[in-house]
Amino acid sequence: MDNYQSSEAEDANIRREVSLREIILVIRSYVIYLWRKVFWLLLFVLIGVAYFVVKANLTPAVYATQTSFMVNESDAGAMAGMGNLLSQFGFGGGAKQGGVNFAQLVELSNSRLIAQRVLFDSAFVNGRDDLLANHMIDVYEYHEYYREAGSTLLQDFYFTHDSIAGFSELENRMFLQLHYRLTQDDPPFQITYNGEIGIVTIQASSVNEMFTYHLVNKLYEVIEDFYTAKSNTPQARSIKVLQARADSLGQELRQREYQLSSMEDRTLGLIGSQARVRMSRIQREASLISGIYTEVLKNIETTRFMLNNAQPVFVVVDRPILPLFKTGSSNLLNGIVGAIFGGFFGVLLLVLIKIYRDVVHSDAVDRIVIQ
């Protein structure tokens, strides 16, 4: 029994040795085969290098940049304080003013209102000072697209003015196309918010460096102007109302003073009882109006000072500077990747050819043996 088990163990060891030897011989044969085909491998490597390098050079470079800014929460508090001051006089102020809502900011940036203000501002791109909308038409090759589509109306179209209220149907069509491209169809900009540190980032990218630069700058400027106007408008309107009230009080005060001087002139210093009572009443009214008038003027100046010295809603952290970051790999990196892919494909193809030939040769030998 022991001899039988020992014999089985020896047979198993021999089979393992034979299998290992066969694997080594097969690997050795493939290595020798590939070495003999080194010329073809080098050819595949060169083809791979050429393909990836040429593809990289034919693919337009993408220029990327960003603007980051913080939302000034203290400014909202200042505006609320101003609103409380104005409310003491019965006027609506900024008491309801709050911080900037990020979801609202993103939705606003995708609106046609913001797109109109961004696109229909002038910018210097490719040696030409023109509307950013016209530069966008060139950057995204809309003319070529419409020529291929057979549209004769838009194949040479450019905007000639920035008054969207006076746009023709054709101008509206192009504006809607640009707005869709700007916000929906692989948009060239993106807005993100880091809630932990309270920083908003506007990122932009395109195949044109100056277009990208102006796009991100103008988008930030338009959004900042919108929120600044939004936060200041109630206070500015209330100041106008207060000023109107002050003008009215000043006119009433001058009327009372004129009445007093007229009465003194008529009586020539001889004041009767009735005249004395009337003059006393007018003096009290003038004194009361004067006190209110002085207080209103003081608070108008205080409110103006707070409004003029209010900090901006947004505080810039980083602005884009030229030259912009150019995305895309170098020729060296593309050459290395191409060499790896070309070599791998060459080895795979040559190995498959050898396997096929070995199988065909084995079948031929088997047929000869059978015959």
Image: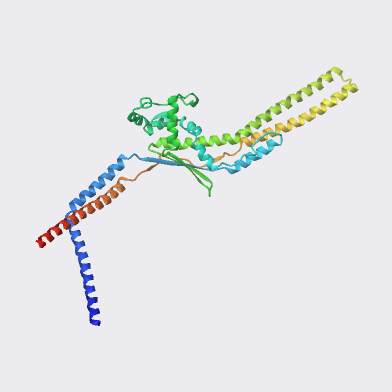
The answer to whether residue 131 of the structure is visible from this angle is: no
Q: Is residue 196 above or below residue 67?
A: below
Q: Quadrant of the C terminus?
A: bottom left
In the image, 215 versus 251, the foreground residue is: 215
Furthest-right residue in view?
A: 273
- Look at the image and tell me whether residue 296 can be seen: yes
| Image position, residue 204 (x, y; %) | 43, 40
Q: Residue at x 88, y 24 (%)?
A: 276
Question: Residue at the left extreme?
Answer: 371
Question: Residue 226: image x %, image y %?
Answer: 54, 35
Q: Position of residue 67 (x, y in %)?
A: 47, 41
Left or right: 157, with 245 as reference point: left
Image quarter (top left, top right, bottom left or bottom right) of the N terminus: bottom left
The single residue placed furthest to the front in the displayed view is: 371
Q: Is residue 143 above or below residue 64?
A: above
Is the residue 256 above or below the residue 204 in the image? Answer: above
Residue 16, percent from left and from top: 23, 70
